[in-house]
Image (tube, rainbow, N blue to C red):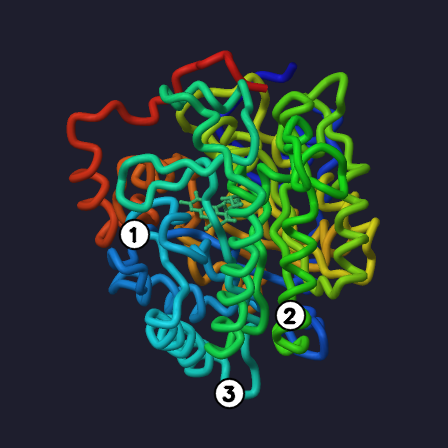
């Protein structure tokens, strides 16, 4: 096991040497221009090969409409010039919101979400001209076991999970979602997709990652009934939603998917895991799923991993977080990118957006170029980097690289604010907006000091 270290590389050669010494498989390339390459998704042109990942700001109103900071964030993201703007987790129903400020898609919020999209596209047009337009995706979610629409937990659990259930003092059984409720929820996703199409998004993402409802259903081997047990049952909810959206929107909105390829939770409670050793992935089922969904109209994939409430280092390698993991962040970057590579190779005609570049600071550009150049993915997605450095894509396109002084430092403060129920963004690089919020919400609370907690991978 290679011990955790904070980022300390001063040149791409130094980083490349470390990758070699650690015998890791992480692609790097100085051919940054591959990231400028446009591509097509279902006949729509994507102006370059970079994406802003879905990043929740927890800054909507109590009704789930975008707030002032939501508009500010998306204007900044759009002005940054990335080819895909993947709008954040937006609940399909009030009780499925992860926090009281999460966006909610509904008839009554449609106009507000339309204004949010319009203001982002306007900002892009001002900078890059009306000939180009980013491809826009709205992520639809039900937060499942992590639902907290009015601050108190209101879990809807797909199946009991000894690794995740510890948080709930009450009898877990009473929170298990019934098959009947799942059938109803399928309709909520379809209605949400119809509204998203009317608003003008290019695609909807049926969020299936990070332990939220659909992600948990995928790993519900221990659940009985028509939504648990075998592969067909565990994927039924997602597949039904795909089928219904395609039929009811007559294919007028593209179908996208942010998928956990690997949960890093022991079998039978984790998806994409090696059944004998959950520390390794086994992508047989995730590959089978994406191939199936491809036949059902899947146009765009975004690959992620882990659970931010349980093993956050898996999905977002960091310098400081709630604990210091027993692995080097570069091992996390390697895992994320290799998950993308395997999935991309299994569905070569579906563009995959890769995850895992933000920890690499400015060298994220070379790594993104390496991943795209070598066919590991078609697009490189940036999450925390977009909070810190919303114009990362513009700098990559116009200056051929990123500026260390504008980069995310993987300090975890954006996640920490979220945990404390604040409106979130980058405390370090966007301090005028977020440092006061951070100070206010973290008052008297223990912060992410990077304490070692040994109950994870
Ligand atoms: C504050 C915060 C909010 C996030 N919100 C979402 C979200 O709404 N939907 C989602 O799929 N992932 C979300 N993520 C995960 C990111 O999209 C991304 O996968 C993760 O940060 C790793 O990418 P990075 O290394 O580029 O940051 C969030 C992450 C953070 C830190």
Q: In which quarter of the image is residue 179?
A: top right
Residue designated by label 3: 130
Residue 337: x, y in percent?
68, 42
Q: Which residue is drawn at 38% across and 72% down?
A: 107
Please tell me whether mark 1 sits on a helix, a strand or a loop: loop
Ligand 1 contact, mark 1 (Cβ < 8 Å): no
Q: Residues within 10 Å of mark 3 (few under 14, many from 20)?
A: few
Q: Which residue is drawn at 49% across and 31% down?
A: 312
Residue designated by label 1: 101
Residue 84: x, y in percent?
56, 66
Precedes in sequence: disc 1 or disc 2: 1
Please tell me whether mark 2 sits on a helix, a strand or a loop: strand
Please tell me whether mark 3 sits on a helix, a strand or a loop: loop
Precedes in sequence: disc 3 or disc 2: 3
Q: How far apart are marks 1 and 3 (CA)?
A: 32 Å
Of 196 and 47, nearer the camera is 196
Q: Residue at x 44, y 29 (%)?
A: 174
Q: Distance between the residues labelled 3 and 2?
A: 22 Å
Q: In which quarter of the image is the C terminus?
A: top right
Q: How crowded is mark 2: few (under 14 residues within 10 Å), some or many (20 or more)?
A: many
Q: Is the residue 248 above or below the residue 33 in the image?
A: below
Residue 401: x, y in percent?
56, 57
Q: Which of marks 3 and 2 is in front?
A: 2
Q: In this view, does 427 lie to the left or right of 1?
A: left
Q: Residues within 10 Å of mark 1 (few under 14, many from 20)?
A: many
Q: Is the residue 140 above or below the residue 362 in the image?
A: below
| Label number found at residue 254 | 2
Residue 196: x, y in percent?
49, 71
The answer to whether marks 1 and 3 mark residues whose Cβ atoms lie closer than 8 Å is no
Precedes in sequence: disc 1 or disc 3: 1
């Amino acid at each position: 096991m290679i011990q955790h270290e904070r980022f300390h590389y001063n040149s791409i050669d130094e980083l490349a040497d470390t990758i070699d010494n650690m015998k890791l498989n992480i692609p790097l390339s100085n051919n940054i221009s591959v990231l400028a390459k446009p591509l097509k998704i279902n006949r729509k042109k994507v102006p370059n090969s970079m994406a802003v990942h879905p990043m929740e700001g927890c800054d909507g109103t109590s009704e789930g409409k975008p707030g002032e900071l939501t508009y500010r964030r998306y204007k900044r993201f759009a002005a940054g010039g990335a080819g895909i703007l993947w709008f954040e987790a937006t609940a399909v129903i009030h009780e499925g919101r992860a926090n009281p400020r999460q966006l909610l898609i509904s008839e009554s919020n449609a106009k507000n979400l339309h204004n949010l999209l319009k203001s982002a596209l306007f900002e892009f047009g001002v900078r890059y001209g009306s000939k180009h337009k980013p491809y826009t995706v709205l992520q639809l979610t039900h937060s499942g076991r992590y639902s907290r629409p009015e601050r108190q937990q209101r879990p809807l659990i797909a199946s009991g999970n000894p690794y995740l259930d510890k948080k709930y003092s009450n009898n877990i059984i009473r929170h298990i979602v019934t098959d009947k409720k799942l059938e109803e929820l399928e309709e909520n996703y379809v209605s949400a997709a119809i509204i998203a199409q009317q608003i003008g998004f290019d695609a909807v993402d049926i969020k299936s990652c990070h332990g939220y409802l659909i992600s948990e259903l995928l790993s519900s081997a221990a659940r009985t009934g028509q939504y648990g047990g075998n592969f067909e049952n565990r994927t039924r909810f997602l597949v039904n939603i795909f089928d219904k959206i395609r039929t009811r929107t007559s294919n007028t909105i593209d179908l996208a998917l942010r998928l956990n390829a690997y949960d890093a939770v022991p079998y039978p409670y984790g998806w994409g895991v090696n059944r004998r050793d959950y520390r390794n992935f086994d992508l047989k089922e995730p590959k089978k799923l994406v191939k199936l969904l491809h036949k059902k109209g899947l146009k765009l994939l975004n690959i992620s991993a882990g659970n931010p409430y349980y093993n956050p280092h898996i999905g977002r390698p960091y310098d400081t977080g709630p604990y210091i993991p027993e692995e080097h962040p570069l091992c996390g970057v390697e895992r994320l990118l290799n998950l993308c590579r395997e999935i991309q190779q299994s569905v070569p005609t579906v563009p995959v957006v890769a995850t895992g570049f933000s920890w690499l600071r400015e060298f994220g550009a070379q790594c993104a170029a390496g991943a795209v150049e070598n066919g590991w993915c078609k697009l490189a997605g940036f999450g925390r980097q977009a909070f810190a450095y919303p114009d990362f894509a513009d700098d990559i396109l116009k200056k051929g690289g990123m500026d260390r002084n504008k980069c995310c430092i993987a300090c975890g403060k954006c996640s920490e604010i979220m945990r404390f129920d604040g409106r979130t963004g980058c405390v370090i690089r966007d301090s005028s907006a977020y440092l006061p919020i951070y100070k206010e919400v973290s008052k008297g609370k223990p912060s992410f000091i990077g304490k070692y907690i040994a109950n994870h991978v």
